Image (cartoon, coloured by chain):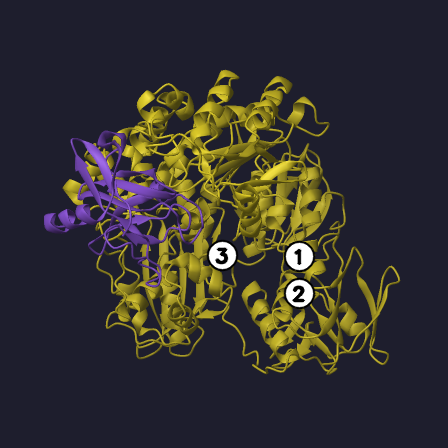
Chain colours: A purple, B yellow
Amino acid sequence: MSQQMEAAAVQRSDWFDIADLDQIVPGTGAAARLGKEQVAIFNTRDGIFAVQNHDPFSGANVLSRGIVGDIGGRLVVASPVYKQHFCLRSGECLEDGSVRLQTFAVTVRDSRVWIAAGE
Amino acid sequence: MQTRKLVVIGNGMVGQRFLEELVAMNQNFQITVFCEEPCPAYDRVQLSSWFSGATDEDLALTDLAFFERHSIRLITGEAAATIDRDQRRVTGNKGTVVDYDALVLATGSYPFVPPIPGHDREACFVYRTLDDLRQIKAAAEGCRRGVVIGGGLLGLEAAKALKDLGLTTDVIEFAPQLMAVQLDTRGGQLLREKIEALGVNVHTSTATQCIEAGDTARHRLVFAEGELETDMVVFSAGIRPQDKLARDCGLTIGERGGVVIDDHCMTSDPAIFAIGEVALWQSRIFGLVAPGYDMARKLAGHLCGQGEPFSGADMSTKLKLLGVEVGSIGDAHGKTEGSRVCVVEDSIKGFYKKLVINQDATRLLGAVLVGDTSDYDMLLQYALNGLDLPESPVSLILPSDNKPVLGVDALPAQAQICSCNNVSKGALCQAIENGCTTIGALKTETRASATCGGCATLVKQVLDAELKRRGVEVNDHICEHFAYSRQGLYHLIRVNKIRSFDELLETHGTGRGCDICKPAVASILASCWNDYVLDPKHVGLQDTNDNFLANLQKDGSYSVVPRIPGGEITPEKLLVLGQVAQKYDLYTKITGGQRVDLFGARVEQLPLIWRDLVDAGFESGHAYGKALRTVKSCVGSTWCRYGVQDSVSMAIYVEERYRGLRSPHKLKMAVSGCTRECAEAQSKDVGVIATEKGWNLYVCGNGGMRPRHAELFASDLDDETLIRYIDRFLMFYIRTADRLQRTSVWRDNLEGGLEYLQDVIINDSLGIAAELETQMQGVIDTYVCEWKRTIEDPVALQRFRPFLNDDNPDEQIVYVRERGQKRPARAEEKDKVELVEVV
């Protein structure tokens, strides 16, 4: 996300302070609450990403526990239940284009992870 | 369609194959089978292996469930006594009467016993059925010497059996050489030299005139010149078709026996058919199993209206007799007019090879191979398919590194690749076209190389050539991030002492990794270095279950399985499991591996549950890992009236030795205390079954979607040898298997099969046994219970939280009660629960 877009997002959204970045082991994800919603936040070599924690295929709130990586150049998380891959940037499911996860804007300030609520 | 009454007389190898072919066609038959022997079909070809440890079950080709499943009435222990062709009725020798619309004679043959005076003395046997073998074995106690009369293929098998029983063994052959049907004079001579070097005495051109009471042993065999004393005699002087029933009811019989059949296996009565060794086709009896199978298939087709005729069979054979490789193809004796020969003999290396070639040296007519049959498959293809010979035919059998290779491309589509199951090259190509891209898949689909395995190399060549031809890149890369197979990665990690995924990716990979390569590399790292799997540098690599050291269930909760070695547990510890389950309200179920599975634990509860379990002395059961799961055991000789060894102690020892061992896929093992096999060891990756002398080791079995019986790997091992073989076997598997490849599939894809595996593990043919053992010892020495370590590691524990910013559990994990325990709520039940809460 470009700085410009991030700035725009910051203006439109409410930002929530979630946790210290070092609470998320590099190369893994962790779950957080955002109001009534659950968010899966991933700490990758390519940055911090957040998508919905709810796995649309299994119905369980588990995406934060998936393995992250890249497939054909797209950063993805694999569902730990039935192993579908979701793009961390767009939320799109690689196996089923009709399924898309909600994504969230993320930023790190003073080693704290912040997430923006709303679209 | 009207149901037809079909009666089959005989349930030998061919009779059984006929039933299998027939039921596969899904037609309406009401089938009755007469089986004279007490048990249904077994593998007579492998009969001798019974003496080297194979059990009746190992030899079985079918079981009662097969007959039940297909509603076939099986009458065992009763021979058919008469056939009434007018009434179309068969009567058994115990009075059973069955009517037929069609009758199939699959009565096989009986051993010919020459009418020598004294042939019916005690301890004179034939070699044909399991019962014969039992009698021979029983009589061998207290015998020192045994004689086999007959130096043909079966006679030499029998000689091996006597030798295995510890008897001094002599073979008496009437003809001037051994295996006179299949081998020429020089071939027979070399075979004799080799067999004599193994300690079996061979007497050719020797006719036994009578058998009488001996002075120093039970019998004396009197020859035209000389005599020989022995305690036991086994007759193996050829077979005769078992055609008495057919004779009695007036069917046309050949001059020298055998029920005359036409190309559709029909006898002189159109309602009666004959297949296998009882059948006489164009004045020939086929005494091998493959032609019998072919008749079975053709007849099943004919009865179902698909009239492919039987057109004779090739009688070429390749086998190992007393450890000596022997092969015979086509016109081995050069009887074809004008035929010429090429011979290569090496008396130092001990092999003899002869080609029989047509007059203008363009076609191969036959071959004899003794001491080295490595060229057999290729030569057979030349002979069967009439392929053009190379300019210098002898080059085909000269020992050379750049021998002309018969490209499988040269074979026509109808070329038979697997003679046991009659699979052509065309059939293999069709299966490949339909998506079989591995040896294992091809074998399952076509049965090619599923019986004797002799054609495995050819099948592989066809597969490789076919994939290449189709432009399918034969690429065993594990995923887009590494241009290596799992085996390749294993070697890189081990040789370069790589300790982390990032290091491997940086030096040998590309991109970021994925959910294929990360868990595979995590597993290899664990097999090699046995580091803690939740270490920050490894934790992101772990697959779903390893990630939290528990088994993820569909609702996002986990199940917990503590280790219960060998399935033995004290009442005190069993109570603890109950108390923990009560405390955390866990759904409790007994597993198939003699353990207890506790379901419905939320991620944040896992460390609490394990604190209680570890305090009570429990360890991780690794039910979540691609690792050793359980070693199941029966109660063994400690309690059981039948047990012959202490299976529980052995199971506990084995389980504690290999606990925590990470491997390409899960590993299951079992130890049974006697041959009744209550621990079901033959369905495990490693199965151990007690014998009176020690342990039999079985390998590469599994249950699940594609069940596969484990194979007998070694017999009567002492404790130490047993463990050494298991050490080597497991490490060799870990080294060479693909990711998520169970031992069964690995074994099916192993070129060289079981024999190769035995060579590597038992004879150390690759010279790596010591290394494998050292490596296993390394893993054993560094074992730590992952859960004990985790609950003492504050950094690792941080991950066991429901949310980064909230310690309240996920409210969407909802349970309802059923049969006194909780279970996950279904979607519609969840809605209700939420509604209630909102109200």
Q: Nearer the viewer, residue A76 or B44?
A: A76
Amino acid type at mark 2: Gly
- Residue B522 appears in the picture as rendered: yes
Amino acid type at mark 1: Ala
Pick whichever of labels 2 and 1 is earlier in the sequence. 2
**Tag 2–tag 3 contact (CB < 8 Å):** no
Q: Which mark is residue B41?
A: 1
**Tag 2–tag 1 contact (CB < 8 Å):** yes
Q: Residue B629: give x, y in percent of width and height.
A: 48, 34
Amino acid type at mark 3: Cys
The residue identified by callout 2 is: B15
Q: Which mark is residue B452?
A: 3
Pick whichever of labels 2 and 3 is earlier in the sequence. 2
In this image, A16 relative to B43: left or right?
Answer: left
Tag 2 secondary structure: helix
Q: Residue B176: give x, y in percent of width and height.
A: 52, 57
Chain of the residue where label 3 is placed in the rendered structure: B
Chain of the residue where label 1 is placed in the rendered structure: B
Q: CA distance from mark 3 to mark 1?
A: 17 Å
